[in-house]
Amino acid sequence: MDVVVDTLEKKYNELLTSLAIVLETNGDEKSEGVDSHLESFQKSFLSFQASCEEAQEFVESLKQSLGCEQFQEQVFDSDSLPTMIDNEKSSKTEI
């Protein structure tokens, strides 16, 4: 998992660096090199996007291996949350 996080962090930092270069270059009166910096930014963006997708796939595979798909749906379903809380309260009072 550390590899996935480290890769995502590296790609994010590369994206920010290329964005900063584009913004600095774009502010110059000369437009020399702007196209190459934009191409570099686009490559960084696509690389970061691919890393995000890989990280999402990794998370999904972990959820499946742990059997957490249904749990997440129950937790984030706004209709079932009050029921879960009420059930928790009633189970504590019965003891």
Image (tube, rainbow, N blue to C red):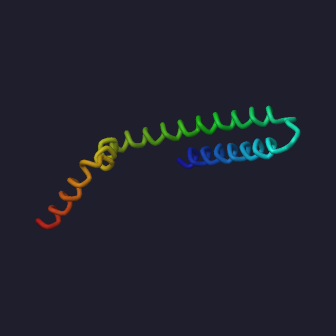
Left or right for 84, reference 64: left
Q: Quadrant of residue 65?
A: top left
Left or right for 35, reference 89: right
Left or right for 79, reference 19: left
Left or right for 80, reference 37: left
Instruction: Please state the horizontal and vertical placement of residue 75, each as a whole percent of the image.
Output: 31, 50
Residue at the image position 19 percent from the left and 63 percent from the top: 89
Q: Is residue 91 above or below residue 70?
A: below
Instruction: Please state the horizontal and vertical placement of residue 77, each as a whole percent of the image.
Output: 30, 46
Instruction: Please state the horizontal and vertical placement of residue 72, each as a whole percent of the image.
Output: 34, 46
Q: Nearer the viewer, residue 60 or 1?
A: 60
Where, quadrant-wise, is the C terminus in this rendering?
bottom left
Q: Quadrant of residue 27?
A: top right
Q: Residue furthest front?
A: 29
Instruction: Please state the horizontal and vertical placement of residue 53, each as a whole percent of the image.
Output: 53, 36
Q: Residue furthest left?
A: 94
Q: State how many labels appear.
A: 0
Residue at the image position 62 percent from the left and 44 percent from the top: 7
Q: Nearer the viewer, residue 88 or 68?
A: 88
Q: Nearer the viewer, residue 4 or 30?
A: 30
Residue at the image position 79 percent from the left and 32 percent from the top: 35
Residue at the image position 65 percent from the left and 37 percent from the top: 45
